[in-house]
Image (tube, rainbow, N blue to C red):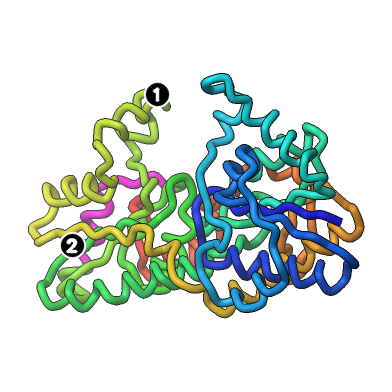
Amino acid sequence: MRVGILTSGGDCQALNATMRGLALTLYRNVKDVEIIGFIDGYKGLMYEKYKKMKPKDFYDILNVGGSILGNSRCPFKRMRIIENGFDKVKAMKNTYKKLELDCLVVLGGNGSIKSANMLSQEGLNVIALPKTIDNDAWGTDYTFGYSSATAIATRYLDEIKTTAASHSRVFVIEVMGHKVGHICLSAGIAAGADVILLPEIPYDIKVVAKKVKETLKNEKNYAIIACAEGAISEADALMKRKDYKAKVLARNGRSVAYEVADELSQEIDAEIRVSCIGHAQRGGNPNSYDREISTRFGVEGARLIIKKHYGEYVVLQGNHVTHIPLEATAGKLKYVDPKASIIKEAKTIGISFGDE
């Protein structure tokens, strides 16, 4: 048996742990298995850049962040576009056939999973594993990397508090989450943020200002606003999609957090600062939960390969690692539900989401 494996899209902390779980299961349960590691994600599959892996490559990577194979972004929307005469889908299929692979394993987020589903529909045997720090993959309660990323964001928010208190400042902290706000929500609650702004709950800056004023007057000399990078105002949420995209482009790469800070400065008399956690949320080594669950994900992926049960996506449902059809999740996102109990509970203790 020959199995190809690649890590695609943005990196995260538990890619290596997941590959280790899958590889060790195959090596221990399949005679004469060979694992081919594609370098830099789908690009390696396109351009035949790969490495013949050995068991020793996987033994000591459980607690190592990043990917031993490397990552790259190959947007799904461009996969079928022939560029300079190069047919990416055809190239990937040719590499798969040339190497006589029995299965391709893809560790990736939403765009990567759409590409994996496309290859499955093209006739390749594909298994996909749920990687994304955003925890926004549909069909699974959890995606590996989320716990580690949330812990980093929480620690950052915690550490900002001391400088905010020392200088009596209001801090607007950008947290990763372009379309979905799971990291910002969890880290904001865990760090005791005063305001949490999410893509799923449009905010009114006057409501945000009211909460900050109340905090500064009645509770403490500083305030913390956890702001997802995709947070959106009520006014912007009413804009046509094309117009809103144009507005975002006009920011020239500046985060919405700066817009929040600018608008807030017109509403309150306080010193306001903006800070961005950035790519540190993807970095470092996986925490204990990510190591555990990623190992379990890898084992389940290997089981599917051994059973020749292809076209599947490994998921966590409750505390049970199982699988669903790849086509059932491709192209779908798991959003924060504005009416979820966690939102109600956060509001009960006084956290504002800028909506009421």
Residue 53 in view (yes/no): yes
Query: Is residue 348 visible to us here?
Result: no
Between residue 236 and residue 60, name the one nearer to us. 60
Q: Which residues are magenta?
A: 201-214
* Nearer mark to the viewer, of 1 and 2: 1
Q: Amino acid at mark 1?
A: Lys
Q: Nearer the viewer, residue 53 or 154?
A: 53
Residue type (three-letter) at the residue carrying disc 2: Lys
Query: Would you say residue 139 sits in the magenta stretch?
Result: no
Q: Which mark is residue 242?
A: 1
Apparent side of residue 115 relative to residue 282 in the rendered image (left or right): right
**Dot 1: element:** helix
Q: Looking at this view, is 47 or 217 the one in front?
A: 47
Q: Residue at x 49, y 62 (%)?
A: 344
Which residue position holds label 2? 213
- Check the image and report above or below for 193 versus 329: below
Q: Is residue 207 magenta?
A: yes
Disc 2, SS: helix
